[in-house]
Amino acid sequence: MKFIHTADWHLGKLVHGIYMTEEQRVILNQFVQLVEEEKPDAVIIAGDLYDRSVPPTDAVELLDEVLYSINVELQTPILAISGNHDSAERLSFGSSWYKNSQFYMQGKLTNDFQPIRLNGANFYLIPYAEPGIVRELLDDPSIHSHDEAMKSVIGRIEEGLNTSEPNVFIGHAFVLGGKTTESERMLSVGGSGCVSQEYFEPFSYTALGHLHSPDAIHHDRIRYSGSLLKYSFSEAKQKKQVLIVEMDDKGNVQIETKSLVPKRDMRELEGYMDELLDASFYTKQNVEDYLKITLLDEDAIIDPMGKLRQIYPNVLHLERKIEQKDLKEKRLFQSMKSQEKNELLLFKEFYREVTTAQFTEEKEKWLASMIDEVKRESLIK
Amino acid sequence: MKFIHTADWHLGKLVHGIYMTEEQRVILNQFVQLVEEEKPDAVIIAGDLYDRSVPPTDAVELLDEVLYSINVELQTPILAISGNHDSAERLSFGSSWYKNSQFYMQGKLTNDFQPIRLNGANFYLIPYAEPGIVRELLDDPSIHSHDEAMKSVIGRIEEGLNTSEPNVFIGHAFVLGGKTTESERMLSVGGSGCVSQEYFEPFSYTALGHLHSPDAIHHDRIRYSGSLLKYSFSEAKQKKQVLIVEMDDKGNVQIETKSLVPKRDMRELEGYMDELLDASFYTKQNVEDYLKITLLDEDAIIDPMGKLRQIYPNVLHLERKIEQKDLKEKRLFQSMKSQEKNELLLFKEFYREVTTAQFTEEKEKWLASMIDEVKRESLIK
């Protein structure tokens, strides 16, 4: 059988204040066309369909359209799970109806661990779940980390695993292995979020989502597809792709990669203002790309962003080489000053950056009263 | 054919700070049981399934369960539209799949105006839509009010209407007629939100949602079912019900009402503290009900709410008769003072009270910067 493995669509994502929905529509149209050409027996989406638990409505409409094209119009089964950015409950709505047309949407982890059977293969759909949820669900008080949770879940799967048939695991997790970047290594030292790659050995193929780089793990049967698009400049050098997996009756897999071409690439440029504004330079490239530009000039330049945007309309970020060493502090200070954000909004942005939880009204009220209190106290002093 | 007409479930509603989801679960279980007993050919839900565009996740799960029971387990077709409290786009997600099992969810108004045919009858599903949306959709610049919008929509339906068959209109609108309350009359004077009842004459039956009282209109073929539960003390004296409609081949209808029994009623009590705390009084009633209590005592009473809640745990609102004339100002002042809300939160609450629009992040930022500015100016003075 043949299936396509993709993940981390992050529909509704904002990158540097710009909604990616139109970019996502372009790339998903290509994806639908690929499904039409390849005629796979299934499409796997390994979590993070949306970028947040309550995505904007145009992202909701885009997902509905794309899944309809694949599942109903092209009559291709879909196997999807929720990731840490999705709301398990919201994604689950309606899934009882979807399965009638072989669209399997596993929003919440359940403890039956029965596979979806397609063309003689078994697909285990394991959505992202916090260790606490798994601990409660499996009634196993020893679970305190993602690693322990995954070990237990796979243990439960193995109780019913028919090893004479091909078995595919679909998950959304931070699986260790292969080349790790600086940030991944830090997490691995902390240990809390990571999952050992060895647990997935019983499966013919493991289709992962979560890490955005398709090279995040080097293994012949355990793979990340990577994200649909580049979603930050740290991904600028990655090659985004989907995986086409051919699996025989014995579970042997052959993997082919297919690149999709975004309307606008996301990349970094470095140079002197004069060079960058020189036609002999910019006519050789797609000036519509999303750019992070690092200026090498040491002299003061009046309105550099305005000048650059006349040629490159989608400059998202501008840096000066000379400033880089104290850039972080400066940026925070500037953003606080120039945008006149109050403390509540600043904290909300910070909270959104560092957690995946919702900043609820209750939390907001609590924080607002806390800020008020601090301000009152500082006035008294 | 036989169908059940209900509306205004408002799942996820907060009443005086208390989530109604568990009450809603109890009453919807009764509703599902009624469907099981009555075996109708369809269930109509005329809008406001949710109380807001992004309902809490347990409301999402409750709706999913209830609709699944009715549509899949009891194999009963569902005809549902979105109301002004729902998000048309979010409710629409998945509707292409639902219709395979005769669950018709019309989230957004479309301009095809084709009916759903069931047992030889035609059902026109017209979700709530702002006049501006209808103006654009029908490309009719003359539409500026809900009345004009409805007139145009029904005009378009009539172009294709087969009057030799029974035709049912399902809508979510403020239709004038019958007994109007003070607040409804005010709106009618303003005129913007109201729709004339005469437009619905071509239909054998009109199943309406929006007004919470089943008596909001007096007509033999144009009816509100009323809301599922009492959602404010202004509804305390209403009798909540669903309508069971028998319709023959010629479109003649016979309507029966069925009451559902809430776990806790919502009602008003008036009396002296001594009376209310007297066992001979309170043992004759369901002390668990949601209560608005008006105390007649003129003397000061220490912690009246605490005393009352020892007997009546669900007192939601307490008034003193003597205070009533200047109550409104007092309440606002108290709520500002005692809860120490800041201006931003206060305005958000006010905004939610008077509009159905979302108080977006953009609006919040704008308001926050405005408040900051005013504060700064007042400091300068």
Image (spheres, coloured by chain):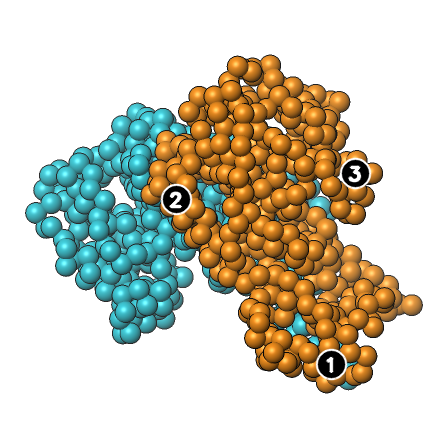
Chain colours: A orange, B cyan
Query: Do callouts 2 and 3 point to residues on the same chain?
Result: yes
Asked if labels 2 and 1 share a chain, the reply is no
- The type of residue carrying mark 1 is Glu
Crowding at dot 2, Cα within 10 Å, few <14 / some 14-19 / many 20+, comes out as few
Q: Secondary structure at mark 1?
A: helix
For the view shown, which residue lies furthest in the right direction? A381
Q: Quadrant of residue A367?
A: bottom right
Out of B22 and A211, give the one closest to the viewer. A211
Residue B339 vs B292, above or below: the answer is below
- Residue A188, label in figure: 3
Q: Is residue B133 left or right of residue B14?
A: left
Whichever of callouts 2 and 3 sits on the residue coming sooner in the sequence is 2
**The image quarter in which residue B281 lies:** top right
Please rate how many residues cluster around mark 3, counting C-alpha atoms within 10 Å: few if below 14, some from 14 to 19, many from 20.
some
Estimate how packed mark 1 is, as few (under 14), some (14 to 19) or many (20 or more) residues with alpha carbons within 10 Å: few
Rendered image: mark on residue A37: 2
Give the residue type at disc 3. Answer: Ser
Label 3 to label 1: alpha-carbon separation = 51 Å
Q: Foreground residue, B16 or A308?
A: A308
Residue under label 1, please give it: B377
Q: CA distance from mark 2 to mark 3?
A: 40 Å
- Provide the chain ID for the residue under circle 1: B
Q: Amino acid at mark 2?
A: Glu
The reply to whether dot 3 and dot 1 touch (C-beta < 8 Å) is: no
